[in-house]
Image: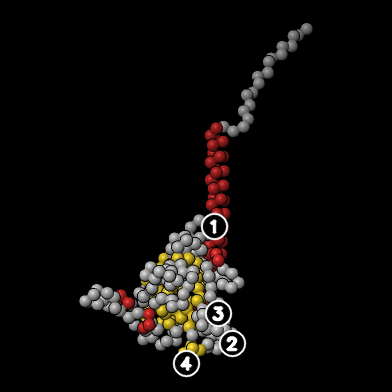
C-alpha cells in the first residue's frame, strides 16, 4: 500500500491597493486638473462680469452725455458762484458766514478726483433762463429770471450730481429746487444723478474760436494775483467723465471708461 504524501501548498503573496508613490501621483494630477477647471471658471465668470460692467458703463456714459448736453445747451454760461442761496451747500464759501453759497470757482482747466466718503467736490456752476411749464421765459421786466445749477461729485455715493436752485422770484417755474438724497422730499426732490461709479471729472474751457481759457494764465505783475480770462469769457465747455466700475469676482476696477462732452453756450 503506497503512502500518498501531501506537499504543503506554497501560498503566493498578493499585494492590493496603491503604493505611496502612485497615490502621490494621483493626488498631484487631481489637484492640477481641478486647479485648471477652477481657474477657467473664475476667469470665465470674471470676463462675463467685466463685459456686464462695460455694458452698464456704456449706459452710464450715454446718460451723462444726454443730461449734460440737454442742460448745458440751454445755459447762458458758467458762473463763478451761485447767487441764489442754497441752504444745503456741500462745500460752502468760507468768506461768507451764511453758509448758503458754494465756494467760488474760476475757469481753470483741471481734473477733479472723487473726494473721500462724506465729502463733496464742486465741478462748476451755470445759469439758465427760468421757464414755465410751456417753456416760455419768465421775465423780470425786459430780462428773464435765471435758475442756477451746481455740478458736483459726491464721495459717499461716487456719483456726479446736478443740483437745481430755482430763482424764488420766478413764479410758475417748471423746475424745483433739489436737495441731497438724505433729506429729499416731494417739495425738494433729490439732486439729479448724472453719472455713477465716477472716479474723476476733467474740465476745459474755450472761446468759440478754439482758444483755451485759463484764469491762471495771466498774473498781475504788481499784486501777483491771477487776472486771466474767467467764466464770463467761456463760450464752450469740455467735460470728461471718467468711470471705474469694480467687478464682483475680480475685486478690482476691471472696467474703466470715459465720455467727453463739449457744449457751446448761448452767450457766445
Residue wearing tag 4:
142
Q: Is residue 57 left or right of residue 121?
A: right
Distance, label 3 to label 4, CA atoms, is 21 Å
Which residue is painted at 51% across and 80% down in the image? Answer: 168
Which is nearer the N-term, disc 3 or disc 2? 2
Above or below — where is 168 with respect to 201? below
Residue wearing tag 1:
248
Q: In the rendering, which numbered label is found on residue 134? A: 2
- How packed mark 4 is, by other alpha carbons closer than 10 Å (few <14, some 14-19, many 20 or more), is few
Is residue 132 in view from this perspective?
yes
Q: In the rendering, which numbered label is found on residue 175? A: 3
Which residue is painted at 57% across and 57% down in the image? Answer: 45
Q: Position of residue 252 (x, y in %)?
A: 48, 57
- Identify which residue, 136 or 7, lies in the foreground: 136
Which residue is painted at 54% across and 37% down in the image? Answer: 24
Which is nearer the N-term, disc 1 or disc 2? 2
Which is nearer the N-term, disc 1 or disc 4? 4
Dot 4: element: loop
Closer to viewer: mark 2 or mark 4: 4
Q: Position of residue 1 (x, y in %)?
A: 78, 7
Q: Position of residue 178 (x, y in %)?
A: 53, 73
Is residue 111 in view from this perspective?
no
Distance, label 3 to label 1, CA atoms, is 38 Å
Report if the CB atoms under discs 2 and 4 are less than 8 Å apart: no
Amino acid at each position: 500500500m503506497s503512502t500518498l504524501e501531501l506537499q504543503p501548498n506554497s501560498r503566493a503573496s498578493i499585494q492590493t491597493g496603491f503604493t505611496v508613490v502612485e497615490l502621490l501621483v494621483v493626488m498631484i494630477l487631481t489637484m492640477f486638473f481641478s486647479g485648471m477647471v477652477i481657474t477657467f471658471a473664475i476667469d470665465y465668470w470674471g470676463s462675463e462680469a467685466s463685459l456686464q460692467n462695460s455694458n452698464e458703463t456704456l449706459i452710464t456714459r450715454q446718460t451723462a452725455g444726454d443730461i449734460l448736453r440737454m442742460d448745458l445747451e440751454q445755459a447762458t454760461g458758467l458762473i463763478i458762484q451761485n447767487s441764489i442761496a442754497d441752504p444745503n451747500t456741500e462745500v460752502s464759501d468760507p468768506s461768507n458766514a451764511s453758509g448758503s453759497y458754494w465756494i467760488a470757482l474760476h475757469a481753470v482747466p483741471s481734473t477733479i478726483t472723487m473726494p473721500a466718503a462724506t465729502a463733496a467736490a464742486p465741478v462748476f456752476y451755470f445759469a439758465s433762463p427760468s421757464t414755465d411749464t410751456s417753456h416760455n421765459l419768465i421775465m423780470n421786466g425786459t430780462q428773464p429770471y435765471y435758475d442756477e445749477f451746481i455740478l458736483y461729485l459726491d464721495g459717499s455715493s461716487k456719483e456726479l450730481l446736478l443740483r437745481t436752485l430755482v430763482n424764488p422770484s420766478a413764479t410758475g417755474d417748471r423746475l424745483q429746487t433739489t436737495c441731497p438724497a438724505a433729506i429729499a422730499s416731494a417739495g425738494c426732490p433729490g439732486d439729479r444723478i448724472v453719472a455713477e461709479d465716477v472716479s474723476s471729472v476733467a474740465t476745459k474751457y474755450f472761446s468759440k474760436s478754439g482758444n483755451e481759457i485759463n484764469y491762471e494764465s495771466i498774473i498781475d505783475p504788481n499784486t501777483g494775483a491771477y487776472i486771466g480770462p474767467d467764466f464770463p469769457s467761456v463760450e464752450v465747455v469740455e467735460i470728461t467723465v471718467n468711470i471705474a466700475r469694480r467687478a464682483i469676482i475680480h475685486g478690482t476696477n476691471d472696467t474703466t471708461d470715459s465720455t467727453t462732452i463739449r457744449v457751446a453756450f448761448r452767450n457766445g
